[in-house]
Image (cartoon, rainbow, N blue to C red):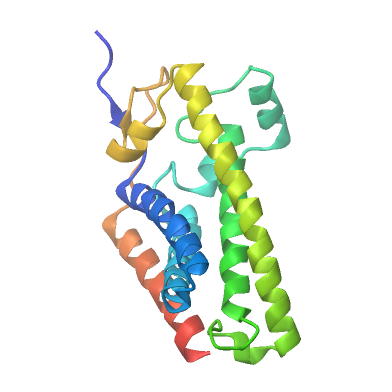
Amino acid sequence: MSAAPIRVWDLPTRLFHWAIVLIIPAMWATHELDRMAVHILLGQTMLALVLFRLIWGLIGSSTARFSGFVRGPAAVAAYVRGRPGPAFGHNPLGGWSVVAMLAVLAAQVTLGLFSGDEDSLHTGPLSPLVSYENMRAAAEVHEFLFNILLGLIGFHLAAILYYRFVRRDALIAPMITGRRAAPESGQEMEAAPLRRFLLAAALAAGLTLAITRLL
């Protein structure tokens, strides 16, 4: 009889993941359809999400913390060569893909804050702090980085398919249910208390408000 599934992803981590899945195509669509007011609002929502995930990566549940899944070059190389060590949650390569995704999202959001169109009709909340030339430069890099983001998304989807059909390891279901088969070590996620979630959410919301409304 197989062991009962145990918790691997907490609810805040899963909600962040699926919110990103929804918001990225929505931001692309609003840009293409010239719905820039909605695009900017979605960008501010993304800012709050990224800030929350960065804070949660420091104080969240064990599998959400950066210290729990960011490994050194030796661990990544061993994993690529097919000699992985024990992993529960993100594997060494997957951990760095998360870091890369967060870094690009953070850069995208930051540039968007300073960006504006050629006529300055639709501008980010921090665009008055920079010159017109820098505002336009930020917008151009903002658009370029979206291509990098698409590449990371493609890599992520390819990894999901590889694990599903080659390694027979479903990655999507645990990100929905939060549970997966217990590892041989018997390790289980150490959930963060509710007060840490409330603190992370309050900090993310407060920082987003300060950046987009008060600066």
177 on left or right of 166? left
Examine the rendered structure and indicate whether residue 49 appears above or below residue 125: above
Residue 61: tell me if it is visible: yes
Extreme residue in the front direction: 33
Could you say which quadrant of the image residue 156 lies in?
Answer: top right
Q: Position of residue 142 (x, y in %)?
A: 64, 67
Asked whether, in this view, residue 143 is left or right of residue 90, the answer is right
Q: Does residue 166 lie above or below 36 as drawn?
A: above
Q: Is residue 121 left or right of residue 22?
A: right
* Quadrant, the N terminus: top left
Q: Nearer the viewer, residue 139 or 50?
A: 139
How many numbered callouts?
0
Expressed as whole percent of the image width and height from the top left, the position of residue 105 reads 56, 59
List the single residue furthest toward the top. Answer: 1
Residue at figure coordinates x 63%, y 17% from the top left: 83
Residue in the image at 57% along x and 40% along y: 154
Q: Look at the picture and state if 105 lies above or below 186.
A: below
The answer to whether residue 95 shows anywhere in this view is no
Q: Position of residue 198 (x, y in %)?
A: 31, 65
Residue drawn 25% across and 21% down? 4
Q: Nearer the viewer, residue 2 or 172?
A: 172
Please report the residue visible at 28 percent of the width from the left and 37 percent of the height from the top: 177
Q: Position of residue 22 (x, y in %)?
A: 39, 54
Q: Nearer the viewer, residue 63 or 152?
A: 152
Q: Nearer the viewer, residue 160 or 206?
A: 160
